[in-house]
């Protein structure tokens, strides 16, 4: 009959928000597959399959001589891990639940929680997959030799952050033109198979080829990661500041566009579809 409302402080409100984001992230992880362990194994299999395909392709085309001097398989994995993290994050955030989703009918839920949950679930899956693949490589094949592990982790997080920012822009535009945004997202993910630069050593590329890929923040991240990973490689044509500023710009644009979309969104938008 009577309901006593507890006084909420800023600290308790922050912890409640973090708890809500945690549950949203868990829900997103389990959304891909009912069995969480099997979902993780599928993600690991995709990563290992891509590493294997690129390793065989480099071997058949005799491109190993163009790689960085050092562990060749680690060179391949450095590109694949960052590529998978970036593209999976873009897909997860751009497909996060929007303002017209049935989940938004629940009082504590909002679009920021949905976006944060999608972003963290993608980071969790890719980070755990990369850690397990590297562990089995270290234990079963040969010991890992990484020049600056903390720096590699920082670039890995930067590739995830740029994926979150670009996904935010696509998420805000999706209610206005869902088919077009879906096609743009798919094209961006496919173009990054080449434009990410994971198959090239940037210092060995001619200037006209660097100009083709220089717009891509993932191109900078992968080259910088290899500079942190290998002792005898120093990136000369890329920087960490470029992807950081691109991510900040896209994040601000995405937040403003998402706020505008949330105010004008209507369930009836998709009634005729």
Image (spheres, helix red, strand yellow):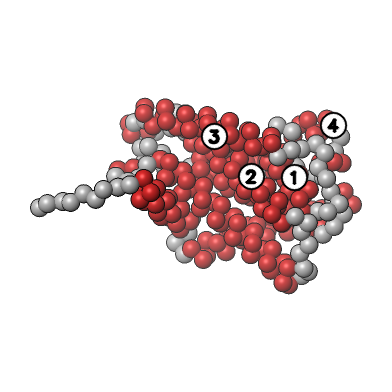
Q: Which residue is mark 3?
A: 251
Work out whether 230 lies above or below 162.
Answer: below
Looking at the rendering, in which quadrant would you find the C terminus? top left
* Residues at discs 1 and 2 in contact (Cβ within 8 Å): yes
Spatial CA span between label 2 and label 3: 13 Å
Mark 1 lies on a secondary structure that is helix
Residue appearing at x 37%, y 42% in the figure? 110
Residue appearing at x 38%, y 49% in the figure? 11
135 with respect to 13 (left or right): right
Q: Which residue is mark 4?
A: 207
Sequence order check, earlier mark of 2 and 4: 2
Q: Which residue is mark 1?
A: 224
* Residues at discs 4 and 1 in contact (Cβ within 8 Å): no
Residue 198 percent location from the top left of the image: 74, 46
51 with respect to 9 (left or right): right
Work out whether 141 lies above or below 59.
Answer: below
* Residues at discs 2 and 3 in contact (Cβ within 8 Å): no
Query: Taking the image as drawn, is residue 266 in sight?
Result: yes
Spatial CA span between label 2 and label 4: 25 Å
Spatial CA span between label 3 and label 1: 22 Å
Residue appearing at x 72%, y 72% in the figure? 139
């Amino acid at each position: 009959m009577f309901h006593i409302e507890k006084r909420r402080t800023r600290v308790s409100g922050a912890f409640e928000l973090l708890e809500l984001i945690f549950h949203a992230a868990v829900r997103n992880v389990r959304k891909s597959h009912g069995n969480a362990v099997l979902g993780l194994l599928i993600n690991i299999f995709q990563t290992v399959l891509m590493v294997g395909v690129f390793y065989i392709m480099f071997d058949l085309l005799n491109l190993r001589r163009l790689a960085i001097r050092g562990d060749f398989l680690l060179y391949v994995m450095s590109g694949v891990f960052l590529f998978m993290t970036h593209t999976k994050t873009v897909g997860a955030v751009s497909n996060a639940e929007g303002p017209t989703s049935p989940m938004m009918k629940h009082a504590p839920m909002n679009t920021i929680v949905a976006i944060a949950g999608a972003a963290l679930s993608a980071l969790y899956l890719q980070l755990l997959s990369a850690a397990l693949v590297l562990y089995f490589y270290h234990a079963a094949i040969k010991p890992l030799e990484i020049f600056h592990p903390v720096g590699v982790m920082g670039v890995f997080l930067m590739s995830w952050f740029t994926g979150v920012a670009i996904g935010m822009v696509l998420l805000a535009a999706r209610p206005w033109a869902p088919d077009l945004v879906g096609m743009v997202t798919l094209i961006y993910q496919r173009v990054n198979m080449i434009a990410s630069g994971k198959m090239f050593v940037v210092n060995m590329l001619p200037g006209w080829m660097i100009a083709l890929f220089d717009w891509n923040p993932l191109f900078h991240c992968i080259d910088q990661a290899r500079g942190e990973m290998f002792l005898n490689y120093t990136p000369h044509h890329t920087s960490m500041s470029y992807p950081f500023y691109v991510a900040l710009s896209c994040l601000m644009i995405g937040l403003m566009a998402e706020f505008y979309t949330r105010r004008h969104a209507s369930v009836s938008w998709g009634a005729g579809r």
